[in-house]
Amino acid sequence: SSAAQTFTIKNPGTATVKNVVVTNNRGGKAQAGNIAPGKTRTVTVKAKIKGKKGKKVAVKFTAKAGNVKASTTKQVKVK
């Protein structure tokens, strides 16, 4: 089964963040591109989820640009 999660990434800094990429530990990847200071960008990342239907699986998502990264874990329901 596959699932798509949408994320909004904000750049709270004073410089443009370049070449932002969002990945997950299930093989998903999305390009967010460059994000100007104070701006946000929304991306959708697909994830291949294996498990029993109806069960929730933890999926880790990471946004990375150069040597800066942030990550979060979401509970995704197997469909």
Image: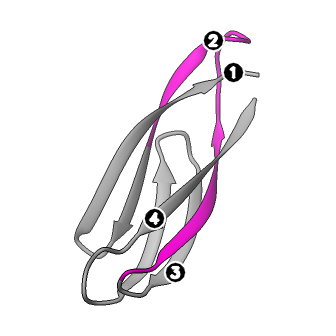
Seen at 36% across and 74% down, the residue is: 11
Q: Secondary structure at mark 2?
A: loop
Q: Please state which of residues 9 and 4 is positioned toward the viewer in this rendering.
A: 9
Q: Quadrant of residue 37?
A: bottom left
Q: Position of residue 26 (x, y in %)?
A: 54, 39
Q: Give, as a three-letter code, the residue at label 1.
A: Val
Q: Which residue is mark 1?
A: 78
**Residue stretch rendered in magenta on the structure:** 38-60
Q: Quadrant of residue 4?
A: top right
Q: Which residue is mark 3?
A: 33
Q: Which residue is mark 4?
A: 9
Q: Secondary structure at mark 3?
A: strand
Q: Position of residue 57 (x, y in %)?
A: 54, 21
Q: Secondary structure at mark 1?
A: loop
Q: Earlier in the sequence, mark 3 or mark 2?
A: 3
Q: Which residue is mark 2?
A: 55
**1 in the magenta segment:** no
Q: Please state which of residues 63 and 39 is positioned toward the viewer in this rendering.
A: 39
